[in-house]
Amino acid sequence: MEKLKVLVVDDESRMRKLVKDFLVRKDYEVIEAENGEQAIDVFFAKKDIALIILDVMMPKLDGWQVCREIRQYSKVPIIMLTAKGDEKDELLGFELGVDEYISKPFSPKILVARVEAVIRRTTVTGEELVELGGIALDKSAHQVKIDGAEIELSFKEFELLNYFVTNQGVALSREKILNNVWNYDYFGDARTIDTHVKKLRSKMGPKGDYIKTIWGLGYKFEVDA
């Protein structure tokens, strides 16, 4: 079986080596880039990158700029590394379609666990096409159609809708949604999940009403009879 390719982008060679050593032990193929411009060049040259580990503070192009550029063309999973612990940065990362957000210093073992969790989450398993209440969700193509018309969703919006559809009729707390869709414990406020739900509802039009707010708890996806 061909090894999954992970692109590690950081201007510190010691950090790249540390991350690479741990990923190689788990049988990943690691490709390195030392700045934002190189990262973009490598990503589009390789075309089969399974996941990107991306530092925020870099010369030439920072992580945010790299993320914006790649997200115009690809929904590849991105894990952001930063020395900052600012919640505003974290929220910006989610707005740009970042899948995980890890502050330095971090445990390499935890990073590898996050990598494996994200790859598991983004690998198609089970039923690939789900149709419910006029919504057709194609997991393999990461495509959503509502009443036959395709709607454009970010990677995280798609994952969120997929989680809602999979758990239709179940009351889901914000914590449970964050732990399953973002796959980590979030200690800030509820703005991250609420912002994504608001955008998702807007893109879904009238079908957005299927996402019910449960005051004081979270949300429930329920198709109207």
Image: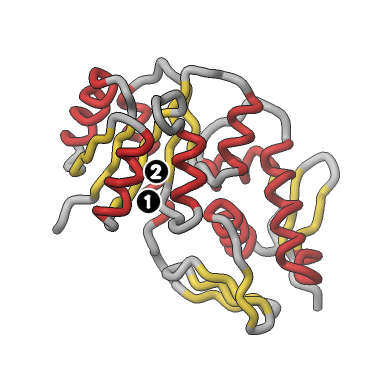
- Residue 159 is situated, as x and y percent measured from the top left of the image, at 55, 56
In the picture shown, does residue 125 fall above or below 105? Answer: below
Q: Amino acid at mark 1?
A: Arg
Q: Position of residue 47 (x, y in %)?
A: 29, 57
Distance CA(mark 2)–CA(mark 1): 5 Å
Q: Position of residue 120 (x, y in %)?
A: 37, 51
Residue density around tag 2, few if under 14, some if 14–19, many if 20 or more, within 10 Å = some
Rendered residue at 45%/24% (across/down): 57
Whether residues under marks 2 and 1 lie with C-beta atoms below 8 angstroms apart, the answer is yes
Q: Amino acid at mark 2?
A: Ala
Query: Which quadrant would residue 29 be assigned to in this image?
Result: top left
Residue tagged 1? 120
Vertical relation: 136 (above or below) 212? below
Q: Taking 1 as reference, is 44 left or right?
A: right
Q: Quarter of the image for the N terminus: give it.
A: bottom left
Residue extending farthest to the bottom is 148
At x 52% / y 70%, what residue is drawn?
Answer: 143
Q: How many marks?
A: 2
Q: Residue at x 37, y 27 (%)?
A: 110
Q: Nearer the viewer, residue 220 or 211?
A: 211
Q: Nearer the viewer, residue 131 or 21?
A: 21
Instruction: Determine crowd level at label 1: few under 14, some 14-19, many 20+ residues with C-alpha closer than 10 A.
Output: few
Q: Quadrant of residue 140?
A: bottom left
Helix, strand or loop status at disc 1: helix
- Residue 190, given in percent of the width and then of the height, sits at 73, 35
Give the labeled residue for mark 2: 117
In the image, which disc is placed on residue 20?
none
Image side of residue 75 versus residue 161, left or right = left
Front one among 64 and 25 = 64
The picture quadrant where one finds residue 48 is bottom left
193 left or right, relative to 104: right
